[in-house]
Image (tube, grey):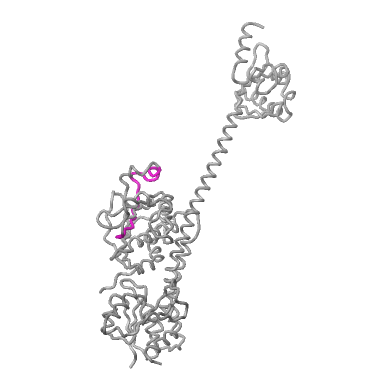
Amino acid sequence: MTKKHSVVESVLDNLPVAVFVKDATDDFKFILWNKKQEEVTTLKAPRALNHTDYDLFSEESADYFRSVDKAVIKRGKLLKVPEEIIETKNGREVHLRTVKIPVFDEETGSTLVVGISEDITEQVKSHEQLANLNRNLVATNEELQNTQLQLIQAEKLESIGRLAAGVAHEVKNPLALLLLGVDYLGQGIDPDDPNIEKILKQMREAVDRADRIVRGLVDFSSQRSLSREPVKLNRVVDEVLLLTKHELTRSNTRVTIHIPRDLPEVFLDMSKFEQVLINLVINAVHAMGKTQDAHLEIRARAESLESVEKNEGARKLEVLRPGDHVVILEVIDNGCGIPNKDSTRVFDPFFTTKATGVGTGLGLSVARKIVDLHGGELTLSNREDEQGAVAHMILRTKLETSKVKIKTTPILPEAKEIDSKGRKPASS
Amino acid sequence: MPKKILLVDDEAGFTELLKMNLEKSGDYEVMIENNSTKAHLTAKAFKPDIILLDVVMPGMDGGDVQAQMESDPELTNVPVVMLTALVDSAELSEGAVAQSGSVTVLPKPVDLSLLLRVLEEHLGTE
């Protein structure tokens, strides 16, 4: 062995990659097999040299190696095998990233296949572990989201329970009207009676009204995953006022709505967002329990966000950015307001200032969760000008239909004043 | 002479139909007041023989209106029948008539024959 030869062998044996050479002109017998190749295959060089893949590996593996070798010779170019698996004698699977190079040995006239393999078994295992961890993380996240949706649904069922008496009352009124119609017609029908046409019209309207109330409750109670669509806010507000009409009437609350007719649509899950508004309206009614002239205002306006509050946290910054076209929706009451000591806790789950049985303390925390799920923001603060509180929401508009170009558009003059029955107040 | 009934309820459709039903026999003349805050003044002008009063109304509720009537010497002896669709009223079952002091309470939806019977009892009409 020449000195030069021994240097080359020493370099080869100390390489961190497996190197082998096969003689394609002699049945692809191995003519070089370095130390790393011994380690990877658990076969010593004397066992491998002058043998073929068929002598060392399973027939299936040998067929595969042979086909790759032939392809390398045929192409006459380097071939990369991103991952191949060999099974060692002790049954261990070794993952290799291999490069095969065709070489023509001018001295002997032989065509050789030089293989250089990197053992990537640990990398593959780490990758699999990472993939498993990621799968678990995704599953856990899904579970968490489902739990959140279940919590939202549970809170919704609770508010349905609270609204049920009022809704039943609202359905009973049209029923009372229907019964009177039946009673009148049951006494005999005189074709010339001018009342009959009026009565039938009233009965038809009563059926429509009862149907609308019941349908509103059914839609509200439906359990679905979050499904957003462009929605006109005044539609949501109308539904919510219908479902909370009884509470508003009983508490003698005057309701004023300011929603500009050309307000851009917002991306909402109608049923879940109704839950937000119902919670805020009921909260406001409770807060105005001792107020003489209870007044609830619902205001909406379009804005382009000039800045996002710095103290809203990184998570919020991810969803709302300066320049975003948004709709600001505010529910304003003239009730007792938020005591300073409670201002940081109002969105905490199970935090309530109401008597046992009146509230679970989940309403506001669920409302904020739902607004979060919509990529929006819900805050609650005291009014600056007078007694009472403001629930302030930033909601995303459907960008394609947004007509807003400037920073702030003032409340439009089309505000309508209605009483809690949804009508203009009677003149007195 | 038909007896005079003042009907105070914010549901305009309901009051219109009840008026038609009650006036059909010719025994009653019905005045409707849909605004509870004006009920007292309307009663003073109309001088009803009996007052039918809804409970849940915006402005003033039935209880407040009733108290207002009772404290007015001109109206204090006028019988009051409260009509209520309140479903959480434990003392009322469907079709029952409850007496609460000088006030009779009838559940909504109103059973017309029951209401007519209550009116007959109070006014001596047939």
Extreme residue in the front direction: B101
Q: Quadrant of residue A268?
A: bottom left
Q: Is residue A260 visible?
A: no
In the image shown, does A165 or A98 lie closer to the viewer? Answer: A165
In the image shown, does A164 or A236 lie closer to the viewer? Answer: A164
Can you say whether B106 is above or below A20 in the image? below
State which region is magenta.
A315-335
Percent coordinates x, y for residue A140 in the rendering = 53, 44
Question: Is residue A324 in the magenta section?
Answer: yes
Q: Quadrant of residue B53?
A: bottom left
In the visual, does B64 lie left or right of A375?
left
Q: Residue at x 41, y 78 (%)?
A: A201
Question: Is residue A32 in the magenta section?
Answer: no
Percent coordinates x, y for residue B10 in the rendering = 34, 75
Q: Is residue B85 visible?
A: yes
Q: Quadrant of the C terminus of chain A?
A: bottom left
Can you say whether A391 is above or below A40 in the image? below
Q: Quadrant of the N terminus of chain A?
A: top right
Q: Residue at x 31, y 75 (%)?
A: B64
Percent coordinates x, y for residue B49 in the rendering = 32, 87
Q: Residue at x 45, y 73 (%)?
A: B90
Percent coordinates x, y for residue A196 in the rendering = 41, 84
In the image shown, does B1 or A232 lie closer to the viewer? Answer: B1
